[in-house]
């Protein structure tokens, strides 16, 4: 049986941002894969993914963690990545082909209306996706529906911005230049699930059992210069890019100088390195579901 009749569509502004950033996430895929590799590893562990498993990756973007997992599960396993944005799915498919990963497939789909039968997967994961779902509880419920009974899902979301200078170093400077209206707690935003317990509650509402939450402390490493990192962040975040674009031609050079200066303390001989904190929420589908 397929999901729900009354699917909640994400708002058009959110979708437009992801559509616009799809080619840029593809362009920076190698650096992004490296930066978030510890998060991928945590998801693999907490979802209990092993060789020959069949795995679902929701909101896969241009294909991560799906492609990393495809290599791990091997030729007898398989991975399906889904994303709401056609450009992301196309980029993921092209990369799977380039890597000759025949066990990785990608489909365009909304998180709360997955094109899979009940009880299909051995594990389900989502890296930095659930915070953007129009209804996170429906999205998590859908992931649970397509999981086999007793199997696990794991979700990665950002902890608070202040603990993540990867985000906050630049936004602190930008906020001095551009008024940022306060973000509503339920708005689709990177930090929607930053408070501990919030995604646990959503998971409980969706029917996830044996729930747990942990704070993953790691370092985001990017072997690039300060200037290249600034370009990468702008291209990864349409929001940041839009704010910068609203500055007058005269203000931009000063804002950029201050932005680059805010990044200097995270720059070393091997490139950029930021302390980072992500929440990993995991749990299982009941055996009796
Ligand atoms: C921050 S990116 C994460 C991409 C990838 N998982 C990664 O960690 O590199 C968020 C992704 O969520 C997707 N997305 C947002 N809302 C969605 C929804 N309702 N259903 C499916 N995908 C969605 C976006 O298109 C985007 O690719």
Image (cartoon, grey):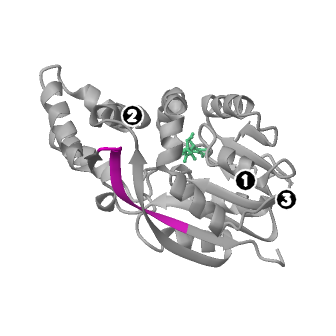
In the image, residue 77 sits, relative to residue 29, either above or below, namely: below
Range covered by the magenta-colored residues: 269-280
Q: Name the residue under label 2.
A: 232
Q: Can I make out residue 179 in this image?
A: no
Q: Quadrant of ligand 1?
A: top right
**Would you say residue 47 sits in the magenta stretch?**
no
Q: Mark 3 points at which residue?
A: 118
Q: Residue furthest front?
A: 269
- Near mark 2 (Cα within 10 A), the count class, few <14, some 14-19 or many ≥20, is some
In the rendered image, residue 221, in percent from the top left (x then y), is placed at 41, 49
Q: Residue 72 carries which label?
A: 1
- Near mark 3 (Cα within 10 A), the count class, few <14, some 14-19 or many ≥20, is some
In the image, residue 77 sits, relative to residue 98, either above or below, namely: below
Please identify the quadrant where the C terminus is shown. Answer: bottom right
Which picture quadrant has residue 19? top right
In the rendered image, residue 114, in percent from the top left (x then y), is placed at 75, 49
């Amino acid at each position: 049986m397929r999901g729900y009749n009354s699917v909640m569509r994400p708002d058009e502004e959110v979708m437009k941002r992801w559509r616009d950033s799809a080619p840029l996430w593809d362009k920076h895929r190698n650096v992004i894969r490296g930066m978030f590799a510890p998060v991928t590893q945590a998801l693999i562990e907490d979802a209990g993914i092993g060789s020959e498993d069949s795995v679902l990756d929701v909101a896969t973007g241009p294909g991560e963690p799906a492609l990393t997992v495809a290599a791990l599960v091997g030729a007898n396993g398989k991975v399906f990545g889904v994303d709401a944005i056609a450009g992301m799915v196309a980029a993921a498919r092209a990369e799977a082909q380039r890597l000759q990963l025949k066990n990785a497939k990608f489909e365009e789909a909304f998180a709360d209306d997955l094109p899979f039968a009940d009880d299909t997967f051995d594990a389900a994961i989502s890296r930095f996706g659930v915070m953007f779902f129009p209804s996170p509880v429906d999205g998590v419920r859908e992931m649970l529906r397509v999981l086999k009974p007793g199997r696990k899902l794991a979700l990665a979301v950002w902890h608070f911005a202040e603990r993540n200078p990867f985000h906050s170093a630049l936004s602190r400077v930008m906020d001095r230049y551009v008024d940022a209206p306060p973000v509503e707690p339920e708005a689709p935003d990177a930090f929607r699930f930053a408070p501990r317990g919030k995604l646990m509650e959503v998971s409980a509402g969706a029917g996830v059992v044996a729930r747990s939450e942990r704070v993953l402390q790691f370092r985001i490493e990017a072997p690039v210069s300060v200037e290249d990192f600034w370009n990468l962040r702008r291209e990864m975040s349409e929001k940041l890019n839009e704010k910068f674009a609203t500055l007058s031609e005269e203000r931009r050079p000063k804002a950029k100088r201050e932005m680059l200066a805010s990044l200097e303390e995270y720059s070393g001989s091997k490139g950029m390195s930021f302390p980072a904190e992500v929440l990993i929420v995991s749990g299982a589908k009941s055996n009796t579901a």
